[in-house]
Amino acid sequence: MPETILMMYVTLASAILAGILNMIWCKTRYLRPLCVPMDGGKNFVDGKRWFGDNKTWKGFIGYIVFNTICAVLWGALCHAVGWDKLNFFYLQHEPSLLYDLLIGFLLGLGYSLFELPNSFIKRRLGIEPGKTLRGAKKVFFVFLDQADSVFGCALVVWLFYDLGIGLYLLFVAVGAATHILMNMLLYFVRLRKNMF
């Protein structure tokens, strides 16, 4: 089990780094025209916003760009130091620049797309962007907020290595726990407005 968890971290290290870089990127003033909501400020048929103001094109594109860059650099490091056997992406596929570009693009896309259903559900429940509920519902949404992107990233891993449902769910659990710890750290260094 410890080796499996280590492999999970090695496999998704580039996505973790890309998430941090994207958060920093979204705080900068560069490419301000992309800081517009993906839903264009439009409402769904129920009169509530599709996703809200926090899901912007700058963040969506940033996830894809940073994941692609980080996957290429992380892949090169894994190949150089012999960590290919610790990375699920390389257990059944030969490493190459094109392969690493594909992995990075798909990780970024999976990360970005799998955050959207959670935002859509929260808008239906009247939860403000960046906020959560109280009590038992808060625990559920704190977990979902941290796990949504991991569902997407782990699914990308599954495309290239047959994880099976058990290993996939372990990826999600470990990823969500890591995401919670990273959010706490980012909150303390003032890159996040709230911890959860």
Image: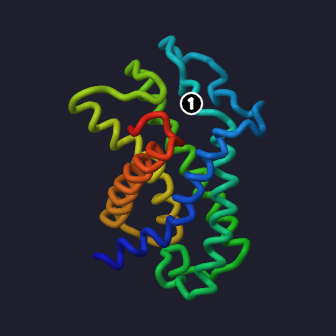
Image spot of residue 36 (x, y percent): 69, 28
102 sits to left or right of 168:
right
Quarter-of-image position of residue 39: top right
Q: Please tell me whether residue 183 is drawn above or below residue 132 in the rendered image.
A: below
Residue drawn at (52%, 83%) of the image: 83
Residue farthest toward the left in the current orientation of the protein: 136
Say how many tags the image has: 1
Side of 185 where 140 appears, left or right: left
Residue 180, how many percent across, how many down? Answer: 38, 49
User: How far across and how far down the image is residue 136, in percent?
Assistant: 21, 32
Residue 178: image quadrant is: bottom left
In this view, the residue in front, 47 or 122, is 122
Residue with the most extreme top position: 47
Out of 110 and 22, give the one closest to the viewer.
Answer: 22
Identify the image quadrant of the N terminus: bottom left
| Image position of 150 (left or right of 40) | left
The residue carrying mark 1 is 54
Q: Position of residue 41 (x, y in %)?
A: 63, 19
Q: Quadrant of the C terminus?
A: top left
The image shows residue 85, relative to residue 132, as above or below, that is below
Q: Is 34 or 100 nearer to us in this picture?
A: 34
Q: Secondary structure at mark 1?
A: loop
Q: Residue at the location (61% across, 52% down)?
A: 21
Amino acid type of the residue tagged 1 in the rendering: Asn
Give the crowd class for mark 1: few <14, some 14-19, many >=20 residues within 10 Å. Answer: some
For the point 58% across and 25% down, the residue is 53
Residue lying farthest to the front in this orientation:
189
In this figure, which colouring scheme has been used for the structure?
A: rainbow
Q: Quadrant of residue 174?
A: bottom left
Please give the name of the residue rendered at 40% of the width and 47% of the height, measured from the top-left corner: 184
